[in-house]
Image (cartoon, rainbow, N blue to C red):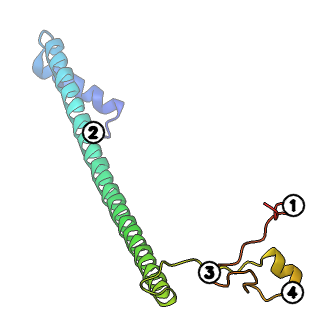
């Protein structure tokens, strides 16, 4: 801290011996040592406080950055969820409008049957063509071999 060499310390000690005297010099040296120790502790405490404040300031900045990133992530997730929700609503509306066009309003809706019946495939009939006794009955789906008699 101070640039004091050995020769300067010797000069200060000789002057202190002459000014203070030999009987009070040990007590004065002890008091000076205590005061110097207090000064060193005070300087160390001030340095520690300044260091702690700097670290707290850095942590506050980091906290603000993390909170900003979290808020940005939250808004992006919310907007993506809103987009998905709107897409689901539009698909649902399209499906409902298509179902309303296909099925009459008083008859229950039935799913379309695009599968070939076993007898249709053998006879070479068009897919979905009704060849049974009742033309209003939907065609049966193909079954496993040997189970068509059940």
Q: Earlier in the sequence, mark 3 or mark 1?
A: 3
Q: Which residue is mark 2?
A: 48
Q: Nearer the viewer, mark 2 or mark 1?
A: 1
- Give the quarter of the image for residue 145: bottom right
**Residue identifier under label 3:** 112
The quadrant of the image that shows the N terminus is top left
* Local SS, label 2: helix
Can you identify the residue that label 1 sits on?
146
- Which callout, 3 or 1, points to the residue nearer the camera? 1
At x 35%, y 34%, the residue is 5
Disc 3 and disc 4 in contact, CB within 8 angstroms: no
Instruction: Indicate which disc, 4 or 1, sits on the residue closer to the N terminus.
Output: 4
Specify the quadrant of the image occupied by residue 63: bottom left
Where's residue 121, x and y in %?
85, 80
For residue 124, the mark is 4
Q: Residue at x 25, y 47 (%)?
A: 53
Q: Nearer the viewer, mark 3 or mark 4?
A: 4
Give the spatial CA distance, label 3 vs label 1.
26 Å
Q: Nearer the viewer, residue 33 or 55?
A: 55
Counting residues from the N terminus, which is met first, the one under dot 2 or under dot 3?
2
Residue at disc 1, secondary structure: loop
Residue 36, percent from left and from top: 21, 27
């Amino acid at each position: 801290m101070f640039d004091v060499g050995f020769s300067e310390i010797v000069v200060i000690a000789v002057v202190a011996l002459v000014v203070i005297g030999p009987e009070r010099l040990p007590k004065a040296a002890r008091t000076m040592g205590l005061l110097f120790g207090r000064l060193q502790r005070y300087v160390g405490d001030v340095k520690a406080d300044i260091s702690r404040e700097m670290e707290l300031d850095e942590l506050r900045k980091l906290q603000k950055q993390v909170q900003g990133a979290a808020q940005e992530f939250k808004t992006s997730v919310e907007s993506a969820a809103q987009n998905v929700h709107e897409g689901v609503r539009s698909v649902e509306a399209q499906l409902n409008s298509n179902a309303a066009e296909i099925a009459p309003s008083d008859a229950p809706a039935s799913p379309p049957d695009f599968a070939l019946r076993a007898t249709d495939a053998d006879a070479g009939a068009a897919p979905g063509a009704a060849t049974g006794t009742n033309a209003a009955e939907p065609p049966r789906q193909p079954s496993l071999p040997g189970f068509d008699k059940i």
